[in-house]
Image: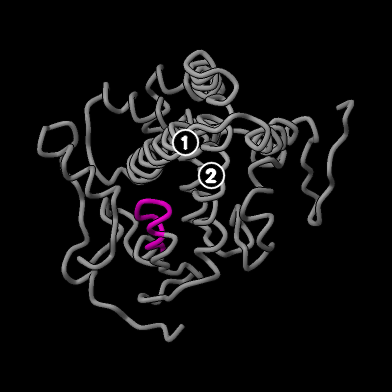
Amino acid sequence: MILGAIHLKGGDRIPIARAIPMVAVHVACLAAFFLDFHWSYPVVCLTLYYVRMFFVTAGYHRYFSHRSFKTSRAFQFVMALMATSSTQKGVLWWASHHRHHHKYSDTDEDLHSPTLRGFAWSHIGWILADRYEATRTELIGDFHKFAELRWLNKYHLVPPVALGVLMFLIGGWPMLIWGYCMSTVLLWHSSFTINSLSHIFGRQRYATPDTSKNNPWLALLTMGEGWHNNHHHYMASARQGFFWWEVDFTFYILKVLSWFGIVWDLREPPAHILQPAESGN
């Protein structure tokens, strides 16, 4: 590549051309300081943050990665489309790599273990690295069979670009900056904390073979994903806040959707799974 690459310890490399768009979105957020302010801008920013966060957590994670509930083919596509607008690559790419993470969590084969390769790698480095650019189709055969998901996975930039264009058409540069750029940056770093901080800060209720931890602050930030030790203990559950005091907004919304028949068969942890085996951490 003309622009070269950043070479990392362990032989990994990040092509500079691949990192530029992500850096550019971050830098674009600074434009908010030079634009006229209106209260509608942060409202749109936070609305798009939480809407897209829900589809990442319910769609990319709990449905496509773990099949923790069932839905129709139509709503399956809606979840994939909305989650793809988060600019976190394609649905099959995301889910296949997450399945690999669970299989090798915190071992040398893990994609993004902060305890083995540090915070920066687990938070954002691995996403840009050459090694993990391809979709692991052998791990996602159950959803790879759907033509519309294969198309969306291949053209994963279409939804976020469409969202950016829509924001510009609605409110010009200020809405593009607040509605797409700032919302996306917040969404990136909030959801990425589950790969990084949720394996460093928090408490282990269950003695899992990895360093996953429960963190209530990250759970609030990510609509329930911060109950990460619960999730690694029983990943098949659509409910990651196992107990009533563990706030899990993603599950609450899924529960409401189940009342209308949009989703069904929400899996929850059986009673024997809820019994903690204290790890002492």
Say which amino acid is labelled 1.
Cys
Q: Which of the two residues, 279 or 21, is positioned nearer the viewer here?
A: 21
Q: Are marks 2 and 1 in contact (CB under 8 Å)?
A: yes
Q: What are the residue bounds of the magenta stretch?
A: 219-228
- The residue identified by callout 1 is 45
Q: Is residue 23 left or right of residue 47?
A: right
Mark 2 or mark 1, which is nearer to you?
1
Residue 72 picture location, percent across and down: 22, 26
- In this rendering, is residue 149 above or below 31? above
Is 30 drawn above or below residue 205 in the view shown? above
- The local secondary structure at tag 1 comes to helix
Measuring from the top left, give residue 228's x and y in whole percent: 41, 62
Q: Earlier in the sequence, mark 2 or mark 1?
A: 1
Q: Main secondary structure of the magenta part?
A: loop
Residue at 41% from the left image edge and 36% from the top image edge: 43
Would you identify the image quadrant in which residue 116 lies?
bottom right
Label for residue 267?
A: none
Q: Is residue 186 left or right of residue 55?
A: right
Q: Tell me the residue that label 2 is attached to.
A: 186
